[in-house]
Image (cartoon, rainbow, N blue to C red):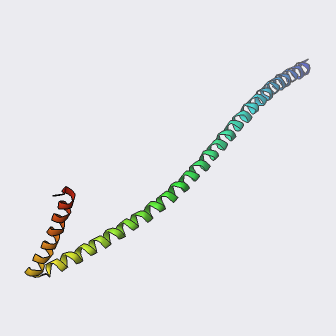
Amino acid sequence: MGSTRYTNMLIIICMVFLAFTIFNVRGLKTDIEGFNEKIENIGKEIDSIQTMNTELDEMISSLHSELELLDTDINKVQNNIYTIRRNTDEKTNSVDKLNISQLQEFFTKRYDSIFEATYRKTGN
């Protein structure tokens, strides 16, 4: 009798273990489906981020091109400023070298031309 009881106990323990294992396997299948869903959602997010990244790369390229054009324009303006400064310095230096009679002649011509232009406009 002792051995039958022991055998029955062992069978009951095996059945409980088997039932426990079966129920846990079903739970794992449900979790696998959930994980597959999460993986698909992450894949969609990755695709949308890659699309956004491509758009941002195109925007960066466009802005870089505009920046290069602006740099070129700035260089042209700086060169023009340098040329104007050089010409102004040359004129200033040439005025400094004029003697009194040359200065009188310069201002007389200048103010006579202004007076004549004003006279023509007013008609007097």
- Residue farthest to the left? 100
**Quadrant position of the N terminus in the picture:** top right
From the top left corner, tell me how far across and down residue 42 is, in percent. 67, 39
Q: Which quadrant would the C terminus be assigned to in this image?
A: bottom left
Residue at the spot 44% in from the left edge and 60% down from the top edge: 70
Indicate whether 92 appears above or below 122: below
Return the residue nearer the eye: 52 or 66. Answer: 66
Find residue 10 and report its image quarter: top right
Q: Residue at x 19, y 80 (%)?
A: 94
Residue 15 location (% of width, % of height): 85, 22
In this picture, is 100 found above or below 21?
A: below
Is residue 39 left or right of 8 when viewed as pictured? Answer: left
Q: Is residue 31 above or below residue 71?
A: above
Front residue of this view, candidates 39 and 99: 99
Image position of 86 (left or right of 116): right
Answer left or right for 111 relative to 67: left
Total marks in image: 0
- Give the residue displayed 80% in from the left and 24% down from the top: 23
